[in-house]
Amino acid sequence: MNCPNTVGAVASRYAFLLQQLCSPRQTPLSAYLARTVHAHAVASGFNLRGPILNRLIDIYCKSGRLRHARLLFDEIPHPDIVARTTMVTAYSATGNVNLARLLFDEMPVKDELSWTTMITGYVKNDDLDEARELFDGMAEKLVVAWNAMISGYVHRGLLQEAFKMFKKMRVKDLVSWNAMLSSYVNSGRMNEAKEIFQEMPEKNLLTWAVMIAGLAQNGLGEESLKLFNLMKLQGFQPCDYAFAGAITSCAALGSLKSGRQLHSQLIRLGFECSLSAGNALITMYGRCGVVGDARNLFLTMSFVDSVSWNAMIAALGQHGHGVQAVELFEEMLKEGILPDRITFLTVLSACSHAGLVEEGHRYFDAMHDIYGITPGEDHYARMVDLLCRAGKFSDANDMIGKMPFQPGPQIWEAFLAGCRNHGNMELGIQAAERLFEMIPQNDGTYILLSNMYAAKGLWDNVSRVRKLMRDQGVKKEPACSWVEAENKFHVFMVDDTAHPEVNAVYSYLKQLVLEMRKLGYVPDTRFVLHDMESDQKEHAISTHSEKLAVAFGLLKLPRGATVRVFKNLRICGDCHNAIKYISKVVGREIVVRDGKRFHHFKDGECSCRNYW
């Protein structure tokens, strides 16, 4: 018979040992020591009591030994709510929701944790019907349970149901608001996200970061940067995730100056080792035309992951450095970094921009054969683009015919673009007809087909395509180009009359053209898309937005500074040729980022070597 003092001392000793074992971070050693203490207690005849038993069960559950936990649990004559909730939580977390529900139903008293754990278990196992039934059976609707249900609906993409629950909540905490905000942001519904953001009674750093990143990723870069600055004005110190969102905005806008400023702020605040911000910076420098800076950052980052490698390969590919992109991909493999589907998209794009057909074939085949990644339609589209750019239409047709699924719009868009580049009218018409069936409201199909006819001088056909476009109610996306100068973006449209300094731009362009003609420049009026007189065609082609933006940049940026122009659509052939001459006349580097890639013009040459 144990003396009371001895029993108390032993109990305290076991409690102390088990408390030491029950640290937040469980290891196999913790479970081993727990079993040792448990066995010793049993062998010595010590009667383990409630709190100690609960700690042992907790250790077994956290170390993944549910069988040991359940055996010990079943030995307890009258398990308390702590032991029951621990087991329910463990079963729910491991997907054993049926076992969790059995224990839950047996509980004589259920607290907030047990209710929310059970509901969350159903939500995580994608059983929203059971979760909702349990939720509706709660006597008191707890905020945590509401949030669990909202998260479940969001995860399933049932935003309307999630929003209905959100509106019914009498008490909404910050978690509730952030959950709804994130759901709208992740689904690209930025108008609803903005409304939620404005209505929030309080905001934390996560709120701001989610909104900044969402605006950046959904093409609202200027709003994203304004919000980033407003966040700072309201006393929030940006986290690295907020910085990454703002930097992503700079990448989309082509704002190198703002991107560099953000990079400096990152370093001052001690976030230079942040992986998310570093990856965003690689993309930003690449998208702003300074791929060398992207490479330097990549080489000096303290840690890189597959996203870093993908971003760097993509940057090299966009700038036409296909060979370097392939070399970096091979280096990635040597480092033991497994490529994912995004990696193959970037390397196939790099091969396409550089005409590396053999390498593209090899990597496409390696996806499935070596890495077990099934190519998607986007990978096939990259291969079709690669083959068509190289003029290998027969090979592209064979690939389309052997695809394991019906080719979608991405495939035919790549095929049509290749036909446009090579003037393959017959195949181009066939591709356009497929696209008219699939996506009749897509303006790009009409424009590419119209351009093909215009290049051949088939003006009646051009008129028919444009009439079809009008009849379908399809509007052409207007071409625009922009350049950053004097601390703001200056946007130019074709035949622009709105910019306050456009007259000076036209005057300067006329001077440039005179110098260009001395070097051999002749306007290529084949890229005029309307039937008109020859002198009218030359005037029309001289007012393209990229020419205006380049001229403005030359006028406003410091002498010798690189001019960086961004365009929403593909650069036209005459503008591409003209800017080569302009770079030679002014003795400056001009970088143009169009809708597909970068062109670096210097000394009368372009980095793409006319392969674009």
Image (tube, helix red, strand yellow):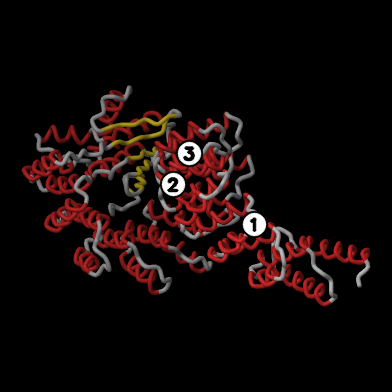
In percent of width and height, residue 57 lies at 70, 65
Distance from label 2 to label 1 (Cα)?
41 Å
In percent of width and height, residue 135 lies at 51, 50
Instruction: Indicate whether 526 appears above or below 303.
Output: above
Q: Nearer the viewer, mark 2 or mark 1?
A: 1
Q: Quadrant of residue 60?
A: bottom right
Reading the image, the residue beneath label 1 is: 108
Q: Quadrant of residue 350?
A: bottom left
Q: Residues within 10 Å of mark 2 (few under 14, many from 20)?
A: some
Please tell me which residue is depicted at 53% across the width and 67% down the height of the picture. Answer: 335
Q: Residues within 10 Å of mark 3 (few under 14, many from 20)?
A: few
Residue 288 shows in this picture: no
Q: Amino acid at mark 2?
A: Asn
Describe the element under mark 2 as helix, strand or loop: helix
In percent of width and height, residue 237 lies at 61, 36
Distance from label 2 to label 3 (Cα)?
22 Å
Report the front residue among 441 and 46: 46
Q: Is residue 512 left or right of residue 225?
A: left
For marks 2 and 1, the one nearer the N-term is: 1
Q: Amino acid at mark 3?
A: Lys
Q: Nearer the viewer, mark 1 or mark 3?
A: 1
Q: Looking at this rendering, what residue extends furthest in the front direction?
A: 108
Residue 299 shows in this picture: yes
Describe the element under mark 3 as helix, strand or loop: helix
Q: Nearer the viewer, mark 2 or mark 3?
A: 3
Circles 1, 3 touching at the beta carbon (< 8 Å): no
Report the front residue among 82 and 210: 82
For marks 1 and 3, the one nearer the N-term is: 1
Reading the image, the residue beneath label 2 is: 186
Q: Amino acid at mark 1?
A: Pro
For marks 2 and 3, the one nearer the N-term is: 3
Reading the image, the residue beneath label 3 is: 168
